[in-house]
Image (tube, helix red, strand yellow):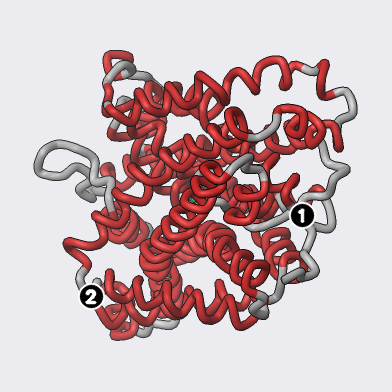
């Protein structure tokens, strides 16, 4: 059924929405802790190379398919197929992408819920509400369940308002605030005693690690997760970009902003950990490795904020607002993938689609909350380490092996008439055809 589609009203709007999707817990938590556990700048270098060599070409594949098809991921992949087999493949990849992104949202909502709880904790502490503060910081099922629901409700409210009035409007408000808070917090933390040890741990590379297969696997996973690839998010956002836009250029901006914010977050989190260390907080676990998992955000950093006295309450407030904003601009892009499909393919109203799909995801999320121990790691590993890189590979296969090459070029030429003679067209088609699939497979089977 034909439904009037939304469109981003400006380049800035798209950039904020797409960067909002890309910048999330992966940048502010995942990247710095991955770097800390994988040889500091050695990880940073591998991550930068893999982002521009593998993830950026895959991002472009999604944006180009999306803008051409002007449809959700399933319909878009079907529409560029050339026969029954590729149509079947398109359908499968589109559906698995939708399923994957829904599961990513289910664990993302849990972690984001913690961020909201810790934000409220800083308010409770400011007001001297001891018992509320205790309840908010205690890792218990009722608290986690309530904040999953709170986070999902806010996500639904934004997505159901539409592409321009919901996603674009909120991303354009929240992303500049995120950058300002991140910069201010980083400057503040860098002035504290011990911070420079963190800067050294982050920026002095341990080159003995650079060829470590685990480092490469982690860096690739990080790059794909961070650019929200493989699950149709960027394809759907691409489908809302105006035809006047030069896709390789705005794709580059998104990748640069995403990487830039991750690198900056490294300058906040690692120094903060060392400040915590110099304040007597334990930052290594019993094996001598950094506390990088949930423990970092929900125990190391709060312990650090507590050692800072009253200033620490405000720093905590700013930090958890930052995390909540980062999560929210990502979660809306995740929910948009199945919502766009339901609206366009099944003619369901946006409001109803957002509400019912989010309800199903919330139930999954609550199941993970209740059976946290086996389920949380399982969902994270399957979605981000197995599913995402594989799906990104299939997007490359679609654009390079299945879709008609002239149509790809025509699409690029829309916002960039001399695309054919440009550098992008000289390199990218070969790249997505051979290098990306092979490299993804190689790293994958490591
Ligand atoms: N890019 C987000 C982050 O770095 O936290 C995570 C993400 C968003 C993954 C959207 C997948 C997605 F579809």
Q: Residue furthest front?
A: 84
Foreground of the two, 60 or 327:
60
Q: To which quarter of the image does residue 31 belong?
A: top left
Q: Determine whether, in the image, residue 249 is placed left or right of residue 278.
A: right
Identify the residue under disc 1: 13
The residue at the point 67 percent across, 60 percent down is 171
Q: Residue furthest left?
A: 286
The residue at the point 33 percent across, 18 percent down is 210
Vertical comparison of 208 with 109: above or below = above
The residue at the point 42 percent across, 67 percent down is 109
Q: Determine whether, in the image, residue 422 is placed left or right of residue 204.
A: right
Classify mark 1: residues with Cα within 10 Å, few (<14), some (14-19) or many (20+). many
**Residue 226 shows in the view:** yes
Q: Position of residue 392 (x, y in %)?
A: 49, 39
- Mark 1 or mark 2, earlier in chain: 1
Q: Position of residue 37 (x, y in %)?
A: 28, 34
What is the distance, in whole Å, between disc 1 and disc 2 at their CAs? 38 Å
> Callout 1: helix, strand or loop?
helix
> Callout 2: helix, strand or loop?
helix
Asked if the residue at label 1 sits under 8 Å from ligand 1, the reply is no
Per the rendering, the mark at residue 370 is 2
Asked if the residue at label 2 sits under 8 Å from ligand 1, the reply is no
Foreground of the two, 386 or 81:
81
């Amino acid at each position: 059924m034909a439904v009037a589609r939304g469109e981003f009203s400006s380049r800035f709007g798209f950039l904020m929405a797409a960067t909002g999707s890309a910048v999330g817990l992966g940048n502010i938590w995942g990247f710095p802790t991955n770097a800390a556990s994988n040889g500091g700048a050695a990880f940073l270098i591998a991550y930068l190379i893999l982002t521009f060599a593998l993830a950026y070409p895959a991002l472009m594949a999604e944006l180009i398919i999306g803008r051409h098809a002007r449809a959700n991921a399933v319909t878009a992949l079907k529409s560029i197929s050339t026969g029954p087999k590729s149509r079947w493949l398109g359908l499968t990849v589109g559906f698995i992408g939708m399923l994957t992104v829904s599961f990513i949202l289910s664990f993302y909502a849990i972690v984001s819920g913690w961020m909201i709880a810790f934000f409220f904790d800083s308010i409770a502490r400011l007001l001297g509400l001891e018992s509320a503060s205790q309840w908010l910081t205690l890792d218990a099922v009722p608290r986690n369940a309530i904040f999953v629901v709170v986070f999902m409700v806010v996500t639904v409210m934004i997505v159901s308002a539409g592409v321009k009035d919901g996603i674009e409007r909120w991303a354009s408000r929240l992303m500049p605030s995120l950058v300002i808070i991140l910069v201010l917090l980083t400057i503040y933390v860098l002035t504290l005693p011990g911070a420079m040890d963190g800067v050294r741990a982050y920026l002095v590379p341990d080159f003995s690690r650079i060829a470590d297969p685990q480092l490469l696997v982690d860096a690739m996973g990080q790059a794909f997760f961070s650019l929200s690839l493989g699950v149709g998010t960027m394809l759907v956002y691409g489908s809302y970009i105006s035809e006047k836009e030069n896709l390789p250029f705005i794709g580059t901006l998104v990748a640069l902003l995403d990487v830039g914010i991750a690198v900056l977050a490294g300058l906040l989190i690692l120094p903060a950990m060392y400040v915590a260390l110099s304040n007597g907080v334990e930052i290594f676990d019993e094996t001598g490795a950094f506390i990088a998992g949930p423990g970092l955000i929900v125990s190391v950093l709060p312990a650090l904020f507590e050692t800072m006295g009253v200033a620490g309450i405000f720093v905590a407030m700013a930090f958890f607002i930052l995390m909540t904003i980062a999560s929210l601009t990502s979660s809306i892009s995740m929910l948009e993938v199945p919502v766009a499909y339901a609206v366009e393919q099944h003619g369901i109203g946006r409001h109803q689609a957002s509400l019912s799909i989010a309800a199903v995801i919330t139930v999954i999320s609550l199941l993970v909350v209740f059976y946290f121990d086996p389920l949380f790691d399982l969902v994270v590993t399957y979605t981000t380490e197995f599913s995402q890189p594989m799906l990104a590979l299939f997007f490359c296969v679609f654009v390079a092996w299945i879709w008609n090459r002239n149509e790809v070029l025509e699409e690029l030429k829309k916002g960039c008439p001399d695309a054919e003679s440009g550098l992008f067209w000289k390199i990218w088609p070969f790249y997505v055809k051979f290098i990306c699939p092979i490299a993804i497979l190689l790293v994958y089977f490591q």
